[in-house]
Image (cartoon, rainbow, N blue to C red):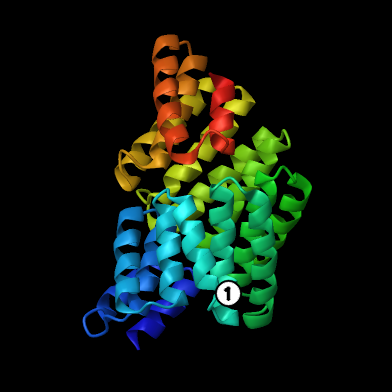
């Protein structure tokens, strides 16, 4: 019963209540499904180390698509997109229709993180269709699939399509609950698209709205807010506010290191961005040194052909 309660809170965006209920259910239910839910919760709030522990426990308890999918999401949260993609692809082979909606959405995000947004788009299209059939148009699963599809289209440079999908997702979230943390992720994605379309002031507004939703839902110290702050910093930089951008990026870098770990790839990416902004604020030696160090680590882990690595190289 506690797992059912936790799952309900999870779908409703009440993630702190979901964790309390899931933790309570571990007292008398150590099934893989409980650990799978806790893994997904941890990944979404920005606690990758807890996500990985629960993901591994889920698979150890029950080796099946749902638990393997949770492990895949945990691997993605830990900055291992290639392993995440492989795990999720394999899990999908035996997944039910309902599971395929959730796993397909996660796979699309893993493909995007691995530098293959076109593959992510294909996975997201399938996931969206499955979510519509199994959960309906007014469901968190459908909204999440739309967001994943929007992010993959954005990564592929298809900003018009990305905007359409993300606005559609925003409408779904608003119809469910304007306080749902899923809305925050959608606002951040819309902000990234706005920045790509040379609308930085609009992007700043969207990211500030996202941070407020994240904070109201999870508290100001949640790891996921670090990523939102990084996006805000990038948008501020595009408006010409270099000092404000550096301040926000410094906060993001510190929070990412604290929540994700000092050696997490997202921490290194945040360090690169902070160093780049230091350079723009006149700290040439500090900026160049930090950019070179971060680029070396990220390129070793993602490979020279990854879009993030190529983007870093253009700044060096």
The residue positioned 64% from the left and 75% from the top of the image is 131
Q: Above or below — where is 220 with respect to 122? A: above
Residue 208: image quadrant is top right
Name the residue carrying label 1: 100
Q: Is residue 288 above or below residue 34?
A: above
**Residue at the extreme left:** 27
The number of numbered badges drawn on the structure is: 1
Give me the residue at 68% from left, 81% from top.
133
Residue in the foreground of this view, choosing between 129 and 179: 129
Q: Residue at x 69, y 45 (%)?
A: 156
Q: Is residue 160 visible?
A: yes
Spot occupied by residue 29 in the image (x, y as percentages of width and height): 27, 84
Q: Is residue 45 above or below residue 236?
A: below
**Counting other residues with Cα less than 10 Å from the Cα at mark 1, is it few (<14), some (14-19), or many (20 or more)?**
many
In the image, residue 92 sits, relative to residue 170, either above or below, namely below
Q: Residue at x 70, y 65 (%)?
A: 125
Q: Classify the position of the N terminus by image quarter.
A: bottom left
Q: Nearer the viewer, residue 305 or 145?
A: 305
Picture coordinates of residue 312, whole percent (x, y): 54, 28
Question: Can residue 17 be seen?
Answer: no
Q: Is residue 60 left or right of residue 128?
A: left
Which element type, helix, strand or loop, lies under badge 1? helix
Residue 256 in picture, x, y percent from top left = 37, 41
Residue 252 appears left or right of 11: left
Work out which residue is located at the far right of the displayed protein and give it: 160
Picture coordinates of residue 2, whole percent (x, y): 33, 84
Q: Quadrant of residue 265?
A: top left
């Amino acid at each position: 019963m506690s797992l059912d309660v936790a799952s309900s809170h999870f779908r409703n965006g009440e993630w702190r209540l979901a964790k309390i209920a899931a933790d309570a259910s571990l007292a008398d239910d150590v099934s893989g499904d409980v650990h799978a839910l806790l893994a997904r919760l941890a990944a979404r709030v920005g606690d990758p180390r807890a996500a990985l522990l629960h993901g591994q426990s889920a698979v150890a308890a029950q080796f099946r698509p749902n638990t393997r999918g949770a492990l895949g999401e945990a691997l993605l949260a830990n900055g291992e997109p290639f392993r995440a993609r492989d795990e999720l692809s394999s899990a999908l082979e035996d997944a039910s229709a309902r599971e395929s909606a959730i796993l397909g959405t996660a796979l699309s995000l893993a493909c995007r993180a691995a530098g293959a947004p076109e593959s992510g788009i294909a996975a997201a299209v399938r996931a969206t269709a499955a979510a519509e059939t199994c959960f309906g148009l007014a469901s968190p699963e459908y909204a999440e699939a739309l967001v994943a599809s929007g992010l993959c289209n954005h990564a592929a440079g298809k900003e018009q399509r990305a905007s359409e999908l993300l606005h559609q997702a925003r409408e779904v979230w608003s119809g469910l609950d304007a306080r749902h943390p899923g809305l925050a992720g959608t606002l951040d994605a819309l902000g990234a698209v706005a920045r790509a379309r040379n609308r930085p002031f609009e992007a700043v507004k969207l990211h500030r709205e996202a941070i407020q939703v994240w904070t109201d839902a999870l508290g100001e110290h949640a790891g996921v807010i670090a990523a939102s702050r990084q996006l805000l910093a990038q948008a501020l930089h595009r408006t010409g506010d270099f000092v404000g951008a550096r301040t926000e990026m410094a906060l993001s870098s510190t929070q990412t290191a604290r929540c994700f770990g000092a050696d997490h790839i997202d921490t290194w990416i945040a360090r690169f961005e902070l160093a780049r902004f230091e350079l723009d604020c006149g700290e040439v030696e500090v900026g160049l040194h930090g950019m070179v160090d971060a680029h070396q680590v990220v390129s070793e882990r993602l490979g020279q052909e990854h879009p993030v690595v190529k983007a870093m190289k253009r700044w060096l």
